[in-house]
Image (cartoon, helix red, strand yellow):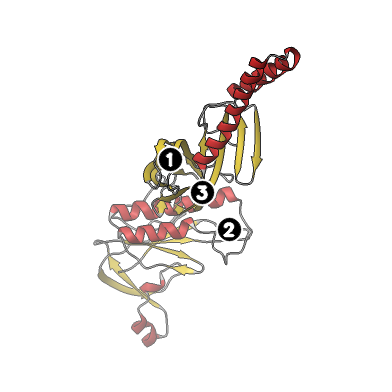
Amino acid sequence: MENKLNYKPVFTFDYYNRSLALTREGAGFIILVFGIGLGAINTGNNLLYLILAMCCSFIAVSGTLSELTLKQIQASAEISKTLYYDEAYPLRLKITNEKKRAPSFSLNFSLPGSTDHRYLADRKAYLFHLPAGKTVEKNLLLKGIRRGPLDIDVCRITTSFPFGFFVKTRDVPIQIHSIVLPKIEDVELPPAFGDSIEGEHNVQTSGDELFSIREFHPGDPVKSIHWKSTARTGVLKVKEFLSGGKRSYNIFLNLYDADTDQRTSQEKIEKRISEAASLVYHLIKRGDEAALKTPDYQSASDNSEAHLEELLRRLALIGYEKSASPEVSASRFELERIEK
């Protein structure tokens, strides 16, 4: 059992969806009970037998009341549908005591540790008293630390009520579904105004006013093709625009290594997705329009908050799609200026 309270278990026993941990205080009490029992047997003193019976009743009462406290406690949760990487978000926990008459006492609520290191929950919710038939809301803080879908289906309830001799834990079902967006980092953006830049990211600029029509060159965007001139001459022609006005960029994310056509390492995949997400984020925040291209997806070009969230969600789920091949990988991305 994961230690969510400030106690050092001496012994832990797991059964069904519960676990029972013996604390140091509880172990000391049980040793005392054995000592009293041996003394009663050796001396035949009736008073020692009475004390032994009282001590044994404490253990029985502790088990009964702790089980009653955990019984019929249910929980549900609400959290944002998308979480930015490594940012803490409030998780609203609704806790209900479905018992008709009996209240519950001294309850600790927490989320079990993520086995695949997807999240951190750095707070616990504590309820001293939960009346019968009542619902109480508490807030936890949840932080996504790995890109992709985030699913939590268990909430852990722990109590040491009534004497602190034992700590009993019960797991209750809970439905938490969210998406952790890729890590957003500081990246070098193409200049807001200026000439075309040839390099790793191939940033091509254009504006709103038609300047000329020229022959097609490799690397020119398909949207810049002037189809009437192409049909008339039989040679691909493209439009050139003067710089100025709102700018729009295509971010290309190739899912295979451009040099070797082999699956790249997971570390490189995450780095490239993070870089692409950072470009999308900072370009849209700057006021430019951005679009995302992958071999099987082409988004529209926009600069709204809804569009930004949609693109980041797409990037967050790369490699997690149900139909995706396990061999999917990512390689370098490129920027291309889209002609308006």
Considering the image in quadrants, where does the C terminus appear?
Answer: bottom left
Q: Which of marks 2 and 3 is nearer the N terminus?
A: 3
**Picture disc at residue 159:** none
Residue that numbered label 3 is attached to: 271
Element class at badge 1: loop
**Picture disc at residue 103:** 1
Q: Nearer the viewer, mark 1 or mark 3?
A: 1
Element class at badge 2: loop
Q: Which residue appears farthest toward the top when viewing the image?
A: 43
Q: Earlier in the sequence, mark 1 or mark 3?
A: 1
Residue that numbered label 2 is attached to: 329
Question: At which x and y percent is residue 182?
Answer: 46, 51
- Residue at left offset 36%, top offset 58%: 308
| Separation (CA) of disc 2 from disc 3 | 12 Å
Query: Which one is nearer the viewer's eye here, 51 or 33?
Result: 51
| Separation (CA) of disc 1 from disc 2 | 53 Å
Q: What amino acid is at disc 2?
A: Ser
Q: Which residue appears farthest toward the front when viewing the image?
A: 46
Task: Judge whether residue 234 can be spotted in this image.
Answer: yes
Q: What amino acid is at disc 3?
A: Lys
- Residue at left offset 40%, top offset 67%: 299
Task: Judge whether residue 86 can be spotted in this image.
Answer: no
